[in-house]
Amino acid sequence: MNYRIGKIEGIRTLTKSIKEYEIVLDEPINPEPGQFAMLWIPGVGEIPLSFADAETKRIKFIVARVGKVTGHMHDKLRAGDKVFIRGPLGRGFTRIRGGRALLVAGGYGLAPLYFLSRKLRSMECGVKALLGFKSDDEIFYVKEFEELVETEISVEHGSSGHRGTVLDLFKDVIRVERFNMVYACGREELNLALIRKCLRMGVPVEASFERIMRCGAGICGSCSIEPLGIRVCRDGPVIDGSMIAPMLEAP
Amino acid sequence: MSPDLEVELAGLRLRNPTILASGILGSFYGLMKRVEDAGAGAITTKTVTREPREGYPNPVFVDLGFGYLNAMGLPNPGIREFSVELRRAAREIRIPLIASIGGRNEEEFMDVAGRALDAGCSGIELNLSCPHVSGYGLEIGSDLQLACSIIKAVKSISSKPVFTKISIHQARPDIVSRYLGSGADGVTAINTIRAAAICVESMTPILSNIIGGLSGPCIRPIAVAAIYEIRRELPGVPIIGVGGVDGWRAALELILAGANAVGVGSAIARKDLQIFGEIIEGLRRFLAERGFKSIKELVGYAHRS
């Protein structure tokens, strides 16, 4: 069977709609930052989740309440419960060695970037993270990032950090600082806007995309970014900005 | 001179005998374009129905190691919306596009086929064999009279070749000759086989639909037998062989049994789109080493022994 058995070790409430799940698997798993797993709860459903962290058998997911399975996780899962994990799947981030990396996250898109920042730090990279949130009460994981890397936050409606979107903050930062690589994860519009800007400036960029996934194996076609035929579950979820370029030609 | 891989299939000319099997990736223009670029000889679309279908909730796919189990539930946007993708594909993709059609009755099949033909598909494949969707596929195909009337009806409006995709249960020469008698130009054999898997840890079925279709290397011997028997009894029938094609040897095995062309499906889960190139190169090398000029010489070759 293609599932590993995971036991929920701890659940932490991060905001009113986001929780963190620490899971211990029956076997070690060695995902790259940016890769994902399909998490199956028998009788409920199966969803894709990016690894927010992983160390041998211990993994973390950051889960926003969006649908049936995530709702069940938020409401019903308790420490000690079992879940089933298939993965790691897809293509993760390409890690630079040395140089400076800029991480740009929209909301819970920070999950794979947290895992990435842990790995980048051990490769002697200078890392700066920009985390965007909608409001003050949706802010989370800032301390975790600050312990690892230089971190700035933006809030659209609130009083913390920079006022505005993370895209605004990104534009301000990229105007004065130079980076060898930009890593992004957020809503598709944010990813596309960041890719467009980076390509114009000649800065390499990779973004992690989120789509409804079915097979997770690259054969059903449900998660294709059209008209390019890029399967988010197989060719992604991390996609090099240059692959998206043909979609961005129109303004 | 490099051996010739071109094949002819009920009037369709394929640059090589590999065909993207139905249900795999053939849902959007961009994906189909990538399959063409990967080297495929033809493309079968994902099955399209008259009305949009959501399909089943996850899990829909299980990698069993020795094969694959899936129950997608024929998700598709319906023929009206899909026609847009198909039209663009027909305009920009040069290899033949076979539209896989599903329906619950003759009228639905006619409607969908008519629109797919209008959109410019090169051929039609009638899904009379999907094993896990109530009211569709095998449930329609099991009724021989109904299947024949659907074939007759679609053929009456189609100047393009019409293939009937059959399950192992329909893979009998007597049934296939009834299909041909009703106007089918060829058969696609075989569809996935009705199957299920239960997770021992959770003690529950894995697929949300419980029942799915089994594909992959484990069904190849079943496909080989089906193709072999149809070829033996019906020497002239165009056959698209499908079932466990995971490399050039498997493709060749189906061809030797009698397939004119072979479908490639779930093996993409393991080998990705490079599998088309791998099969093409493998076949070419084999032909050259054994001194054959054309892959056509090997269709049904195993019947000589």
Image (spheres, coloured by chain):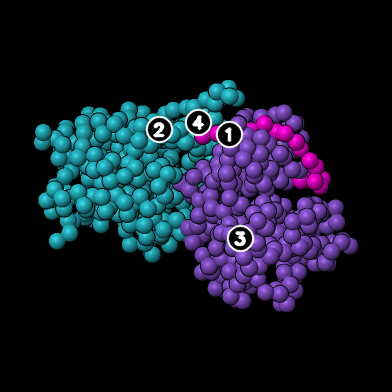
Please report, as a chain letter, where disc 2 is located. B
> Secondary structure beneath disc 1?
loop
One can see residue A123 in this view: yes
In space, the residues marked 3 and 2 are separated at their CA atoms by 34 Å
Residue on which disc 4 sits: A1
Amino acid at the residue labelled 4: Met
Marks 4 and 1 in Cβ contact (< 8 Å): no
Amino acid at the residue labelled 3: Ala
Choose between B158 and B226: the one closer to the eye: B226
User: Left of A97 or right of it: where is A134?
Assistant: right
Look at the image and give the residue range highlighted in magenta. A1-18
Residue on which disc 3 sits: A207
Residue on which disc 2 sits: B66
Please report, as a chain letter, where disc 3 is located. A
Say which quarter of the image contains residue A249.
Answer: bottom right
Residue on which disc 1 sits: A27
Please report, as a chain letter, where disc 1 is located. A
- Which image quadrant: the C terminus of chain B? top left
